[in-house]
Image (tube, rainbow, N blue to C red):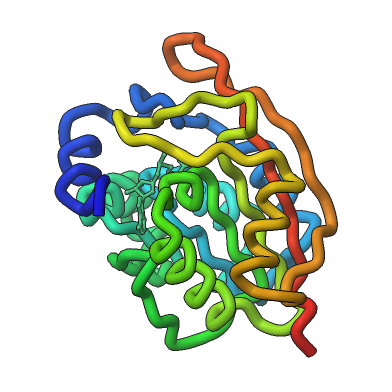
């Protein structure tokens, strides 16, 4: 798979987290959407979280239990070091989302900038299997990707760009009738160097009874 663990370990080993193009000091839109759909005490997972500060913010606001999953051990190490003992209660999961088999379910699944790296149909099918297994009935999936007018590459890797409708269509193809779209937002991310990256954030409910 292009962009395997070695690629990402190298990226996180070479630069500090706040120099990465996807860095957000405060992941405001993610936080807004999570706050809308998650209640304290309900389980949350951040997929391909990298060194994101979303978990820090959710801990500050009293949410949990929290799980943080990433392919890259180096990325998880950055977050674990930053959080120190505050991160002891987090379930840190080093795994490839396309083959991961969850051992519990979650009320909210959050993915910012991971699904769009899955350019192969088999990888997207693997992601969908993990999502279907991990999301509890009525649970919420927040999936942010580069938008249809966003960049064609990220960290040297090609991506698939999605308008919210196209993302909904692809997920419905992978998991027919399973996900109901609740919300979709456009968002302009400004990278640490000041470049603009167009994202879309879509919110789905697991309609499985
Ligand atoms: C562009 S970064 C986004 C990180 C984080 N979500 C954020 O918003 O700051 C993409 C992340 O996805 C992770 N990743 C890429 N492919 C993955 C896969 N197949 N399974 C799990 N994580 C993956 C990378 O290691 C990296 O941390």
Residue 172 image position (x, y, % from top left): 69, 66
159 versus 131 height, above or below: above
141 versus 151 height, above or below: below
- 165 or 70: nearer the eye? 165
Residue at (44, 38) in percent of width and height? 159
Residue at (38, 35) in percent of width and height? 158
Residue at (72, 65) in percent of width and height? 38
Viewport quadrant of the N terminus = bottom left
- Res 10 → quadrant: top left
Describe residue 78's horizontal placement relative to residue 105 as left or right.
left
Residue 133 image position (x, y, % from top left): 54, 83
Residue 42 image position (x, y, % from top left): 66, 75
The residue at the far top in this view is 194
Q: How many marks?
A: 0
Residue 140 image position (x, y, % from top left): 71, 67
- 28 or 61: nearer the eye? 28
Residue at (77, 62) in percent of width and height? 37
Viewport quadrant of the C terminus = bottom right
- 138 or 128: nearer the eye? 128
- Res 35 → quadrant: bottom right
192 versus 92 height, above or below: above
The residue at the far right in this view is 182
110 versus 57 height, above or below: below
Describe residue 109's horizontal placement relative to residue 124 as left or right.
right
């Amino acid at each position: 798979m292009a962009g395997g663990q070695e690629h990402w370990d190298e990226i996180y080993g070479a630069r500090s987290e706040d120099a990465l193009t996807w860095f957000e000091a405060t992941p405001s839109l993610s936080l807004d959407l999570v706050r809308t759909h998650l209640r304290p005490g309900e389980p949350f997972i951040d997929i391909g979280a990298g060194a994101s500060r979303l978990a820090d913010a959710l801990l500050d606001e009293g949410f949990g239990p929290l799980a943080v999953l990433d392919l890259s051990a180096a990325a998880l190490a950055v977050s674990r070091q930053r959080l120190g003992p505050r991160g002891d209660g987090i379930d840190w999961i080093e795994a490839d989302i396309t083959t991961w088999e969850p051992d519990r379910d979650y009320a909210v699944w959050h993915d910012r900038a991971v699904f769009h790296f899955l350019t192969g149909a088999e990888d997207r099918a693997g992601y969908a299997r993990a999502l279907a297994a991990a999301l509890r009935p009525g649970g919420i999936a927040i999936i942010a990707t580069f938008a249809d007018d966003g960049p064609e590459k990220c960290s040297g890797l090609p991506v698939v760009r999605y308008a919210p409708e196209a993302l909904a269509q692809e997920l419905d193809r992978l998991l027919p009738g399973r996900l109901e779209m609740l919300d979709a937002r456009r968002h302009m991310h400004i990278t640490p160097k000041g470049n603009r990256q167009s994202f879309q954030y879509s919110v789905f409910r697991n309609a499985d009874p």
